[in-house]
């Protein structure tokens, strides 16, 4: 619906246009002569066209937005097509098309362009966006403006069309390699059945086709007078819980990128992974595996910001389940303080593994106190290191 002020201005412009036509006609009548009638004759088509546009049914313009897909990864090109179907072949001087999108930061124009349809009834406008920041974008409306080239008449209509896209954070391909392989921990069996440890035979069984020669238990074979092979305990893939600190920091986007890379690599390796994310709201995703978990965590990483408004270490005090033994936890932080390190080292026990990734940009310097805290953590037996963007692929290297 048109704003009352805009409607008033439009009515005044129309009255003024009629007044100009009347004034030019009166001038030609009273002045007479070729020049006055020539001016009136020249102005009349322009005025007639402007008056005609006032009655153009702009609300009957059919417009449709078409998206190639609804899910993107940072760096991919977002392609949007807008199909326009006009009700009549009346020549139009111009159409201004503005596609508007709403974000967490509020509404803003996504793309705007001027088309010159003239006698065409159908037009298609395509625009592209690359390097869109991660996040969820809601296409909310398409704004259409039309008028004559002299600005005597201008009309506008807003068409509501809601569509959403999600831009997931960037990631890199990396080798996921847990800090150590634990037996009797985790819930997911390793994919490679050949991952057996000959020092951990737990029973024997009758020989089956495909068993290795080295697995034969000779003493049991001689005792039972049939070939017996060793039964091994199968390794379990390591369950990992990531703890993401969303304290405001210039390196937060790198932390999101590294987290997304670890999640993707872990799921591809067949491991279970969970996420505990601290910001204005605490978000906990239990340790699971599979594509569903990958999509869930990626969506969270796409839509969250560095909005933690209190100290990170105070939250660690309340997370009782972090003290559960036999689990692997990786803390992803952009800055390291003594209080945070004290809380993390308190969680360390003999039966679990803790990693601390201090994420820095390529040129960002590590503060002396942060370097000292990392050395302190290593001395306590934790896997603590600085991870820069150029070294993400080496994050799990010892």
Image: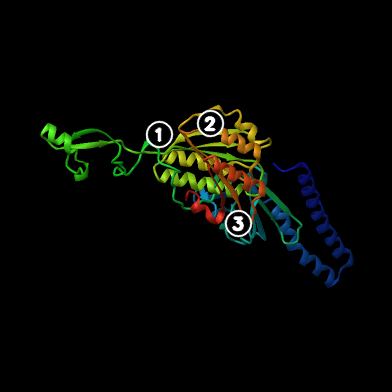
User: Which residue is at the far left?
Assistant: 225
Asked which colour scheme the image uses, the reply is rainbow
Q: Is residue 225 above or below residue 29?
A: above
Q: Is residue 246 visible?
A: yes
Residue under pointer 3: 362
Query: What numbered label is drawn on residue 322?
Result: 2
Task: Identify the residue shown where x is 81% and y is 68%.
Answer: 39
Return the x and y of residue 263 as percentages of the image width and height. 48, 44
The one of 301 and 224 positioned closer to us in this rendering = 224
Query: What numbered label is drawn on residue 5?
Result: none
The one of 244 and 66 positioned closer to us in this rendering = 244
SS class of the residue under badge 2? helix
First in sequence: mark 2 or mark 3? 2
Looking at the image, residue 226 sits to the left or right of residue 300; the answer is: left
Query: How busy is the neighbourhood of tag 1: few (under 14 within 10 Å), some, or many (20 plus)?
Result: some
Tag 3 and tag 1, C-beta contact below 8 Å: no
- Measured in 3D between alpha carbons, the distance from the residue under mark 3 to the one under mark 1, in whole angstroms, is 36 Å
Residue 232's quadrant in the figure?
A: top left
- Measured in 3D between alpha carbons, the distance from the residue under mark 1 to the one under mark 2, in whole angstroms, is 16 Å
Query: What numbered label is drawn on residue 185?
Result: 1
Tag 2 and tag 3, C-beta contact below 8 Å: no
């Amino acid at each position: 619906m048109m704003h009352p002020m805009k409607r008033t201005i439009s009515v005044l412009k129309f009255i003024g246009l009629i007044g100009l036509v009347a004034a030019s006609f009166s001038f030609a009548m009273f002045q007479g002569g070729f020049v006055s009638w020539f001016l009136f004759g020249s102005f009349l088509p322009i005025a007639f066209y402007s008056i005609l546009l006032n009655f153009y049914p702009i609300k009957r313009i059919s417009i449709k937005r078409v998206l190639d897909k609804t899910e993107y990864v940072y760096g991919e090109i977002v392609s949007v097509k807008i199909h326009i179907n006009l009700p009549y072949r009346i020549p139009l001087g111009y159409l201004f098309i503005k596609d508007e999108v709403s974000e967490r930061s509020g509404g803003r124009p996504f793309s705007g362009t001027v088309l010159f349809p003239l006698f065409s009834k159908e037009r298609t406008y395509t625009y592209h966006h690359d390097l869109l920041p991660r996040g969820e974008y809601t296409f909310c409306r398409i704004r259409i403006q039309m008028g004559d080239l002299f600005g005597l008449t201008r009309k506008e209509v807003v068409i509501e069309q809601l569509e959403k896209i999600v831009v997931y954070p960037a990631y890199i391909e990396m080798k996921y390699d847990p800090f150590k392989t634990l037996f009797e921990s985790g819930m997911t069996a390793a994919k490679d059945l050949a991952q057996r440890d000959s020092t951990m035979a737990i029973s024997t069984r009758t020989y089956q086709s495909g068993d290795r020669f080295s697995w034969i238990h000779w003493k049991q074979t001689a005792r039972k007078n049939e070939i017996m092979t060793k039964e091994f305990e199968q390794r379990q893939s390591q369950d990992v819980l990531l703890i993401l600190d969303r304290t405001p920091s210039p390196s937060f986007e790198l932390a999101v990128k590294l987290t997304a890379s670890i999640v993707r690599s872990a799921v591809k390796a067949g491991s279970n992974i969970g996420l505990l994310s601290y910001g204005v709201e605490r978000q906990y995703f239990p340790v699971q595996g599979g594509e569903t978990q990958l999509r869930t965590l990626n969506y969270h990483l796409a839509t969250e910001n560095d909005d933690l408004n209190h100290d990170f270490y105070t939250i660690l005090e309340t997370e009782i389940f972090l003290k559960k033994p036999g689990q692997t936890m990786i803390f992803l932080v952009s800055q390291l303080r003594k209080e945070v390190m004290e809380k993390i080292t308190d969680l360390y026990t003999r039966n679990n593994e803790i990693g601390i990734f201090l994420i820095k940009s390529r040129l960002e310097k590590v503060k002396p106190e942060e370097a000292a805290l990392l050395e302190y953590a290593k001395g306590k037996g934790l896997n603590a290191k600085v991870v820069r963007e150029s070294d993400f692929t080496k994050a799990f290297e010892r």
